[in-house]
Image (cartoon, rainbow, N blue to C red):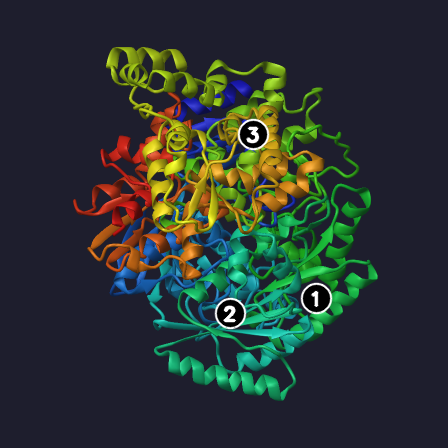
Amino acid sequence: MKEKLQELAGLLEGDFFTDDTMRILYATDASAYREMPLAVAIPKTTADIKKLIQFAHQNNTSVIPRTAGTSLAGQVVGNGIIVDVSKNFTNIIELNKEEHWVRVQPGVIRDELNMFLKPHGLFFGPETSTANRAMIGGMVGNNSCGSNSVVYRSTREHLLEVKAILSDGTEAEFKTLSNDDFHAKCELNTLEGKIYNNIRGILSNYDNQQEIRKQFPKKSVERRNTGYAIDLLLEKSPFVAGMPDFNFCDLIAGSEGTLAFLTEIKLNVVPLPPKETGLLCVHFNSIDESLRANLIALKYKPSASELIDHYILECTKDNIEQNKNRFFVQGDPGAILVVEFVKNTREEITAICSQVEADMRAAGLGYHFPLLFGNDTKKIWTLRKAGLGLLGNLPGDEKAVPVIEDTAVDVEDLPAYIREFNEILVKYDLHAVHYAHAGSGEIHLRPIINLKTEEGNHLFKTIAQEIATLVKKYDGSLSGEHGDGRLRGEFIEQMVGPKNYQLLKQVKNTWDPQHIFNPNKIVDTPPMNSMLRYTPGQQTPKFNTIFRYHNQDVLQHAEQCNGSGDCRKTQLSGGSMCPSFMATRNEKDTTRARANILREFLTNSTKVNRFNHKEIYEVMDLCLSCKACKSECPSNVDVAKLKAEFLQQYYDTNGVPFRSKLIANFTKSAQLGALVPGQYNFAMTNKPISNLIKKLSGFAVKRSMPLMYTTTLQNWQRKRRNTSSGDGGRTVYLFCDEFTNYNDTSIGIKAILLLEKLGYNVIIPAHLESGRTWLSKGLIRKAKTIVNKNIAALKDMITEDTPLIGIEPSAILTFRDEYIDLANDDLLEAAKKLSKNVFIIDEFIAAEIKRGHISADQFTTDEKQILLHGHCQQKSLSSVAYTADILSLPKNYTVQTIPSGCCGMAGSFGYEKEHYDLSMQIGELVLFPAVRNKKAEVIVAAPGTSCRHQIKDGTQVHAKHPVEILYEALV
């Protein structure tokens, strides 16, 4: 087979991989399943897809269509060839504004489709919590919907036509057909003809009709993804007179890529909703209360009614990003029901919500009824949508597992159903997380189970069986939107009856006689508790790590990644995670991939040093250590931390590369350069000499190098120790980081002069370098030594009254982050206390403004416009808002924040010769175009030294640190 795969690779225009690394990365999705594929294909053309199908035909294997890989039921996990269309099949082909339809390729992202449609006054209605990376092909495959399904229903209702490749390699187009056209199709002597003739035979049979109507979910359950949707086809012409015309798209939606390979998709789009949105966020003492109140809310026809339970709310407390979105939460509610109304005016919404509140209070339901508008609504939906990923935050081996999370019943049955559901869990001493779509009869319920144990594996299946029986009792659907896959396929026969199950198998066998397309999903699935990520009873060793992993070990931290794929969003959706993926669009360059590769080898390696694998090194290589994942990943997977830990462990066996030593020892090199700054700067700017140094050091020749100031900041301050003009005001300590001390000295000088002018006494205490360069290259044992010496030196000096302020975000923020993870046990509490009194200078000034200690009267009234780019670690561990606030203090200064992620430099990353091109590619995503397009008089501000350097190299524009701008604005 190996030779045949190599031959196939040569026939394709796209990429084709058979190496272990890529197969590992595609062995999982967002489900509990793991199975190594035969190969991974990234096709470029429809011809590539046809060749892959032909190969599968000839070699008794399969093709598994995949887009974003966020499936929760194992739909895109299998042992065939994974065919990833997310990179190259991303075109919006055609829009018809008059007829309200759009034609797209399957790799178009749902939210980005709506960005395209918005200027035309249109949008695609069905929404998923993964909408900023979920792709239309996957949404069709799963028949996806989301919080707004009470209005826009599911993808199926908007699917008009598809172009597809059938299992014999022929192309077909499926769309609405008249009765005559339908019967004509049945007479074709082709695979397409057999498909039409088969469904006509099935649905024309009276006994089949009776059995289908008896056994499939009742019609009031609109979320219905149980098996193939032959029940919906039955209610079409020609089988029922007067009903809508036949369209196989009803069957294709929800078929999970098991019947055909889609290449083009035509969708119905609808007018944009009214402009005003209000969210009534009703607080309850219990889940049961919220579900009874949900029935009251639905009488007022909301556009969404979503549940968030107390487990989700607890998880948000420990998530940096989502904790900011808890502003509306009062106390510790047992549940919150988020009821959305969309109208033309806020007054209309307020009036409706007053009635809803009155009705609920009359029924004794709810105790707090905040009504939110504007940007606050986005924060609430962000918090709700983060629910899936937040469930990965549990620190140990017990996880909230996707097993019974997708059941749907009639909304009137929901309170009783959930009560019985929880009674079953109590029987097994389990409890579940409850969240999501109360308005449409579907609550995502996840029991907390340890799948690494034999007992947990057995319980996984037992609970699934019990709940399947309960769903059948209520004539509900075992899958409402997440699909059957291999998770629920085992129970479909129970859900629809043995006779109907045979009809579903007949459909599969007619469309795909050799089971080439995504086999063992929906029908003929293996036991649902087999092929899981974790082998029951698996044993892993204890890891002797340098970093502290709070209440877990390094493997468990990697395992927090549940595959939800938040790291696959693009720059169009905002945020910083993940810059390398945004530039390359390769799965290998996602945060998820890095967690997956580490989990795989730490779990299964047979080496003494389980970190000693080149495969991990290759996947970790393009991590910029920007720290975006620490805050933006809902599961809080800190891949920068994992990368640093991995590098130290890997170097322990393989040695430390020269360039890594050179970068880590930046402070020592800078100390030498500072002795002869003129000669150093000449060497760095003289092209022949500079290029030779760069080549010898492994740096990119195209990259400019940072220069030395004529003195160091410490020397400058030491010489003027008795000339401070702080007027006896509050004392603050300035952390003199290694970058400000040697390179950005002028910024440090202006920072001190600014603070003194504003009435503060500035002291530079005795301390070592920050340790940032050592951390960035994974030399964390040395960093640990520096960390503990700095904690010991500063712990008794730094208090709430005498804080420590830093100019360079990447240096000062180590006190809030890595210092806590590297502190010796006897210094841990001191490190935590210290972290609470350490601030970026932007934060400190913003707080002093708020306290009234600094005012606009101290600054010019001239007009200035400022374009602000925030530092990655500032975004992750603090906020760019502080910088925007201080730059807005002068009365006529206006600030616009660039919606950029990482600048691409990321410390030494952008200097390294093999990373330079990617570094500049990342800069070109948002940052560089924004800077180039500014007016000449607009000032560019950037707190980070690497960011300013990148902006200069990429745009030839000199960016200023915010303190420079404020210093120059003093009167």
95 lies above or below 650: below
Residue 188's mark?
A: none
Categorize mark 3 by other alpha carbons within 10 Å: few (<14), some (14-19), many (20+).
many
Q: Disc 3 marks which residue?
A: 644
What type is the residue that disc 1 sits on? Lys
Q: Is residue 781 visible?
A: yes
Residue 121 lies, in percent from the top left, at 28, 65
Categorize mark 2 by other alpha carbons within 10 Å: few (<14), some (14-19), many (20+).
some
Residue 205 lies, in percent from the top left, at 58, 65
* Residue occupying image coordinates x 44% and y 66%: 376
Residue 235's mark?
A: 2
Q: Disc 1 marks which residue?
A: 472
At mark 1, the secondary structure is helix
Q: Which residue is most to the left?
A: 936
What type is the residue that disc 2 sits on? Glu
Compared across the picture, whether 473 is left or right of 48 comes to right
368 lies above or below 589: below
| Marks 2,3: beta carbons within 8 A | no
Compared across the picture, whether 100 is left or right of 313 comes to left
Instruction: Measure the alpha-carbon separation of dots 1 and 2.
Output: 22 Å
